[in-house]
Amino acid sequence: MTRPLTRLLVVDPELPDDDALVTGLQAQGYAVRLVRDGAGADVQLRLWRPHVVLLELVLPDQSGLEWFRHSRGVLAHVPVIVVTRHATVASAVEVLGEGAHTLLEKPADLSVLGGHLQRALARKTAARDGTPRDELEPGVEGFGALVSRAQGMRDAFRLARAAAPTDANVLIVGENGTGKELMASALHAHSLRASHPFIRLNCAAIPADLLESELFGYRRGSFTGAIADKKGLLEVAEGGSVLFDEIAEMPLSLQVKLLRVLQEREFRPVGGTTSQQADVRVICSTNVNPDDAVRSGVLREDLFFRLNTIVLSLPALREREGDIALLAVRFLVQFADRHRRPVSGIEAAALRTLERHTWPGNVRELEHVIERAVILCHGPEIRVEDLPDTVRLATAVPRPGAMPIGQSLDEIERFAIVQTLERTRGNKRAAAALLGIHRPTLYNKLRRYGLWRAEPVLSDDEA
């Protein structure tokens, strides 16, 4: 029998030698050694030189985090996957911040663990060979299926990476088509709940009278047609995450019940007499300014305060400098392969046309435009004539931060104020800080240029 080449060190005082997880890993071709404490792990680390380590956080002679820290020099490029039943939000953030590959909760699913092991080993090989860890170009960052070189999106990625391993509520704000659902999916995939379901509920797509039973489930006989018990999405998502898409569209009566889920971690099915525990992580998204939604009465203020523990703002595509070309090329490769089309590039004139468009539909619109162009293209490169009229004939507008040419100083100042207010989503306190002026000065300029309560970019929120 060929000796397995991948050496896997398991540091865990809780696992028996014949544990099903250990047996399953051996069946997958790993040479597994199991030690019970940090001292034994130190010996194996130096003598056996494992390729990857599975680590429990609670050891009899020291904490797993302490062992990980003092072993960093010896570990070098050896990836460490934490598998524990003792994780807290603080410990998860700390151990991942120290460089652990990922953290999984016990009991770990063998197939999920196997996938993480393969990815960890692939990254180790790439690091050892001096090759990039992924296919991202210099200056480009990614999170899940999202990629960007724009600072606004990269800031959102960094905040999302910090929030993902916690159970904190997350509110994702952005226009339609900016990637809110992809962000929510990436948050789940990078969380401790990744091996459990990820459920998406579109609050705007389900009639109000059905939304409650879809969310909480119902009991037999609770209404006409309820001939059997039905699980709601909160029960189906047990242990996982739920995305409430377009949360501002949820009826106010149901928002009260969702607030109870967040506060009490329990819910009651329609027609039920007892409450059930809700072990889910809640992620919400909206395409409207949540402050405006609260002021207009479509979003409860107490619910908003519960949801906005972490707020991820995804900028519109027109605000993401350099991302139109980046995403266009990625979509081209994707759709050329899917539709088996011999298209390999975009002509310079076509790319300039794409970059002049304002993209009201954001990334989703760009994706559809490129797919259409790939299908209609008659040569190896997408040309201007392959683009739809809505893109070819669109009037170019200045990009955020770009000063218009040939304008008076007053017109330039007005333009700068409008652009800054759009960037701050109408928050005049933040806009004044960015412009380097006092708020009363900003108010005077708003009145001077006819912007006071006259344009939708403005907000009454001074916080």
Image (tube, grey):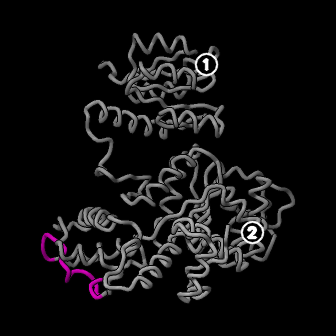
> Residue 301 appears at what percent x and percent y?
75, 69
Q: Residues within 10 Å of mark 2 (few under 14, many from 20)?
A: some
Question: Which numbered disc, 2 or 1, marks the residue closer to the eye?
Answer: 2
The N terminus lies in quadrant: top left
144 drawn magenta? no
Whether residue 236 is visible here, answered yes or no, is no
Which residue is more in the foreground, 269 or 321? 321
380 drawn magenta? yes
* Residue 18, above or below 191: above
Query: Mark 1 highlights which residue?
Result: 13
Which residue is more in the foreground, 162 or 32? 162
> Residue 276 appears at what percent x and percent y?
78, 53
The C terminus lies in quadrant: bottom right
> Residue 373 appears at what percent x and percent y?
25, 76
Query: Mark 2 highlights which residue?
Result: 301
In the image, the segment drawn in magenta is 378-393
Residue type at tag 1: Pro
Circle 2: element type = helix
Disc 2/disc 1 C-alpha distance (Å): 47 Å
The reply to whether the C-beta atoms of the residues labelled 2 and 1 are less than 8 Å apart is: no
Q: How many marks?
A: 2
> Residue 67 lies in what quarter of the image?
top right
